[in-house]
Amino acid sequence: MIVFREAELADIAAVLALLKDDSLGAAREVDSLSEYLEAFRQMTAEGNNHLIVGEIDGRIVATYQITYISGLSLKAARRAQIESVRISSDLRRQGLGRLMFDDAAKRAKEAGCSLMQLTMNASRQDSAKFYGSVGFTPSHIGYKREL
């Protein structure tokens, strides 16, 4: 059974391995842990930015980041932004993603959010189908700009 919990500093190497466990991540993530450890410290200090891991029998097999954002639009809706969604490649298509998003929805509701939103790389067609199956609608077009 998978258990979702807040990540700890000792989990970051395993999370990095999950982020690199596909062609896109393998090309953009680096091996040096120092940047990721510092980023985790910054996320933790922010308060509304949480890294979650899914663990089975002591092995970290899933991760996602959830950030709570207060805003004025949509009747001052508070949102949960979901990022960096990963399931270990040897465990995909076994229902863990559904459990992950159940966990995310529970956390978002507890934080006073009225909606969850996410972005994904447009090349991830299987991910798009999955997100639709767990209730997300492709309602917006997202853009990114490197600084």
Image: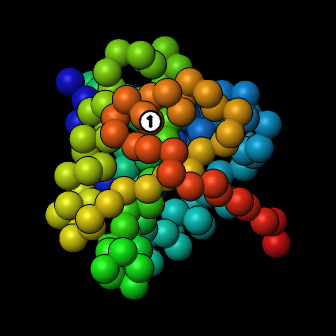
Pick the quarter of the image with the C terminus.
Answer: bottom right
Residue at 42 percent of width and 34 percent of height? 132
Neighbours of disc 1 within 10 Å: few (<14), some (14-19), many (20+): some
Horizontally, residue 1 falls left or right of residue 116, namely: left
Pick the quarter of the image with the N terminus.
Answer: top left
Residue at 41 percent of width and 16 percent of height? 93
In which image quadrant can residue 146 be found? bottom right
Residue 40 in picture, x, y percent from top left: 52, 63
Q: With respect to residue 75, does 128 lie above or below?
A: above
Residue 54 in picture, x, y percent from top left: 34, 37
Residue 62 in picture, x, y percent from top left: 42, 35
Give the secondary structure at mark 1. helix
Q: With respect to residue 97, does 139 lie above or below?
A: below
Residue at 21 percent of width and 70 percent of height? 112
In which image quadrant can residue 76 be found? bottom left
Q: Would you say residue 147 is visible in this rendering?
A: yes
Horizontally, residue 132 falls left or right of residue 145, namely: left
Q: Would you say residue 66 is visible in this rendering?
A: no
Residue 111 in picture, x, y percent from top left: 23, 68
Residue at 73 percent of width and 28 percent of height? 23
Q: Label 1: which residue?
A: 131
Q: With respect to residue 7, does 35 lie above or below?
A: below
The kind of residue tagged 1 is: Tyr
Q: Which residue lies furthest to the bottom in this view?
A: 72
